[in-house]
Image (cartoon, rainbow, N blue to C red):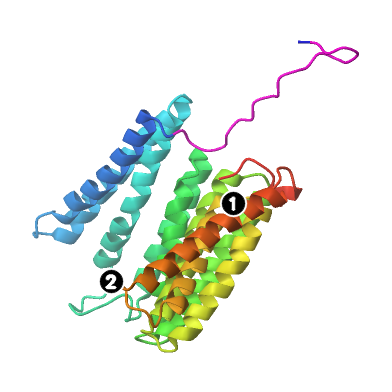
Amino acid sequence: METAGGPPATAPRPVERNWPRLDTPNVLWFFGAFATAIATLAVIDKVPESSRDVWELIVAIAFYLAYAAAGFGLVRSGAWSVPGGLLFAIAVAIMPAIGYGVASLAGMFPTDPFFDPLTDASWSVVVIGLVTMLDALVSFAITRFSFLFFEFVLATLITAQLFLPIFGSNPSGDARVTTSIVIGGALVVIGLLLDARGRRRDAFWFHAGGFFGVAVALVYWASGIGGHPERGWTAMFVAATVVLLLAALVRRATWAMYGVFGFYAPLVHWLTNNLSTNSVGYALVLLAIGLGLFVLGAAVHRSGWFSIGHGSFAVPRD
């Protein structure tokens, strides 16, 4: 259609969305991958007691090689990159079992029946975690399948906690909280660096996992288990407010989700602290907070602060 005195109007170019489609094949692949990984570990755990360490290691290696080989073949075909990448992810999930088998045969894994890796020092456990992290990175280098960063981030958060007993048995709650915040924050920074390079799909797992580590630490602190719960609520509120404000700048729904939950929870705690959960006042406070967040969303939308195309963190969004 042409306008008088002007060039023909052209339809806007469609923008490709940079996230996996939530269609039936993808749902089946991902669900099947999780189910297969859990079942495989269960099979490895059911190896007969006779020469258990040897056979458990052999079975674990056999499963690992089978999944990795099948995944490599699918990835190389070019048309089956998602199922191929998921098979690599299943193989990575088996790596701790392989590490345990190797450490047990070498006599390096603790044999104390009361051994707890979260409170008792063991370099073998830490090395198993580090090898799993490395395996996830190597698998990503082969497949370029972003979901493998989920396993890397998860292994990083767990290994960091397993590393604490090296500095002293039975680490304190404050030490665990500090570690979760530091490691989680570092993962978020890595996510921002990936965002700046345009690798938003890869960055998603670092944002989601990093903020999860920070959130768990703040919830633990606010619960009062480690003492000084009000400091925990205050820290949660301040951190969430900053994250929520920056969410529009970095264009990350992940930031907004963690930010709004961390903003909402302390408000509810403070404003309903002296109210019974069965009272009308309690319900009215919740209503006021909910409507306030709704209005805040409208205000942000009207302000145009979140407009597309600002800086290195432009669309597509997560």
In the picture, the disc for residue 144 is: none
Q: Is residue 143 magenta?
A: no
Residue 295 on image: x %, y %: 58, 56
Frontmost of labels 1 and 2 is 1
Residue 199 on image: x %, y %: 62, 45
Q: From the viewer's side, name the closer residue of 297 and 310.
A: 297
Which residue is under mark 2? 109
| 278 to 4, vertically: above or below | below
Identify the amino acid type marked 1. Arg
Q: Is residue 12 magenta?
A: yes
Q: Are marks 1 and 2 in contact (CB under 8 Å)?
A: no
Q: Residue at x 43, y 66 (%)?
A: 286
Identify the amino acid type marked 2. Phe
For marks 1 and 2, the one nearer the N-term is 2
| 27 to 172, vertically: above or below | above
Q: From the viewer's side, name the closer residue of 223 and 291.
A: 291
User: Magenta-highlighted stretch: main secondary structure?
Assistant: loop
Crowd rating for badge 1 (residues with CA inside 10 Å; few <14, some 14–19, many 20+) = many
Left or right placement of residue 76 versus residue 52 in this view:
right
Quadrant in which the N terminus is drawn? top right
Q: From the viewer's side, name the closer residue of 13 and 10.
A: 10
In this view of the protein, can residue 135 be seen by the observer? no
In the picture, the disc for residue 252 is: 1
Query: Magenta span covers which residues?
Result: 2-21
Left or right placement of residue 49 versus residue 74 in this view:
left
